[in-house]
Amino acid sequence: MEEDSNFVFFDPPLWRQRRSFVNEVLRKNKVTSVVDFGCGEGSLLSFLVQPFEESPITRLAGVDISHDSLEQAIENCRPWDHDREFLRLTPLTIDIYQGSIDVADKRFLGFDALVCMEVIEHVDPPVLDKFFDIVLGTYKPKIVIITTPNVEFNVYFPQLKYGTPEAMLRIEDHRFEWTRREFQEWGNFGAEKYNYSVEYTGVGKIKDGDPAVGTVTQIAIFRDLNPSSKPLLASFGTYKHIENIVFPYYDEPDKTYEEILTVIHHYLQYLCNRIIDYKDEESKQQYEPNRIKIEEIWDIHKIRQLCKTKDKLCDVLSSSSDFTLISNEEIIVHKEYQLDDNEYEHYDYDYNYDYDGDPDYDEDSKHFHSSSNYEDEHDWLTTTTTTATTNGWPNYGNGWQNDDDKGWGDDG
């Protein structure tokens, strides 16, 4: 985080830190289905559309009380042309619902994980009182991730007057902002009541800041210790189902090893004939054109579609006498490939070349949906009041008020 006289900047932006943290927890726990509880305009849902390499998410659901926010969520989560051109390896459906988080809907039973990101501080006490009964007691996902502002961090924002009788909350719509102790007391109560473990962490640190203050965002991660227990509630309400979004995916019959090897050889003729810009003569002498990293082959989208997993790719390569595998990280290619000048002219040396003659998957353009539109802005916390602000916090309008992606430490 960097400071000047007017602003405090976070690098990476806070929205990215929060979503990346959630994404990493889900990936490590091999989660395949997720509920976004209080999804707003779909900033997290659209971020989770990007597939994991293994155990990808195949089912997403979001619920929010605001119909206007849900309309934007639908737009943010729809497949792009890129998704139709470069088919994902596994299916994905996204269901969008309108409803209150103090009502349980039986369609939300059976999800692996539930995320409630920057939501609880917007909820009135009577609704919040039912939160654990519904989330931990009834839906009972294996993992629950909750994020909320850490009010102790407000000491870094003079206009909020933290610790004084005139203290203000970061956003007008906040019903409360908790200290870490208050958040942990609340979380421990729910975890003990419904037999979950809970750990606490956070994102958004200040370099050389006071460790006693903590991070700008505090996070609780709950894990179910008794997955076989029955849901608490016997009766359920009903959310209004707004939209079902289905992503296209690669669903062709499995190819034989010989067919896959034909495609691999097609790409290797270019990988083995790359023009390398050597940094020095020593690098030139060390370069072995017939020594290819497995990761370079795996990065080609067509090969991912055919092999599905990196282990299968290694099996296919091992089945051919044209290759020698080295620790499943590299191969030595024993076959010579010749390219004529015309083939060189039509080849993109980033391997962005499709077996059928069309441009192939570009690893740098992975699907981030709407979140990619926000990368270069909303990554700061203001420390001065300016025009077009609410309690000193910028109000961008254009649907951002409830977006959970403002990036100044409170939402998204």
Image (spheres, rainbow, N blue to C red):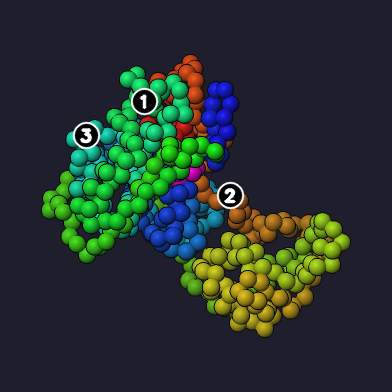
Residue type marked 2: Ser
Residue type marked 3: Pro
Q: Disc 3 and disc 2: Cα gap in Å? A: 42 Å
SS at circle 3: helix
Residue receiving disc 3: 125
For residue 55, which quarter of the picture?
bottom left
Q: Is residue 213 left or right of residue 293?
A: left
Quadrant location, the N terminus: top right
Q: Is residue 389 left or right of residue 284?
A: left
The one nearer the camera, 101 or 107, is 101
Labels 2 and 1 touching (C-beta < 8 A): no
Q: Earlier in the sequence, mark 3 or mark 2?
A: 3
Residue drawn at the location 42% of the way across and 49% of the way down:
22
Q: Earlier in the sequence, mark 1 or mark 3?
A: 3
Residue drawn at the location 44% of the way across and 60% of the way down:
28
Q: Residues within 10 Å of mark 2 (few under 14, many from 20)?
A: few
Residue 265 is one of the magenta-drawn residues = no
Tally of numbered discs? 3
Percent coordinates x, y for residue 185 in the rendering = 27, 44
- Find the magenta span and give its range: 14-19
The answer to whether 402 is drawn above or below residue 80 in the figure is: above
SS at circle 1: loop
SS at circle 2: helix
Residue receiving disc 2: 365
Is residue 346 visible from the viewing direction of this image? Answer: yes
Residue type marked 1: Gly
Predominant SS along the magenta part: helix
Labels 3 and 2 touching (C-beta < 8 A): no
Numbered mark located on residue 163 in the image:
1
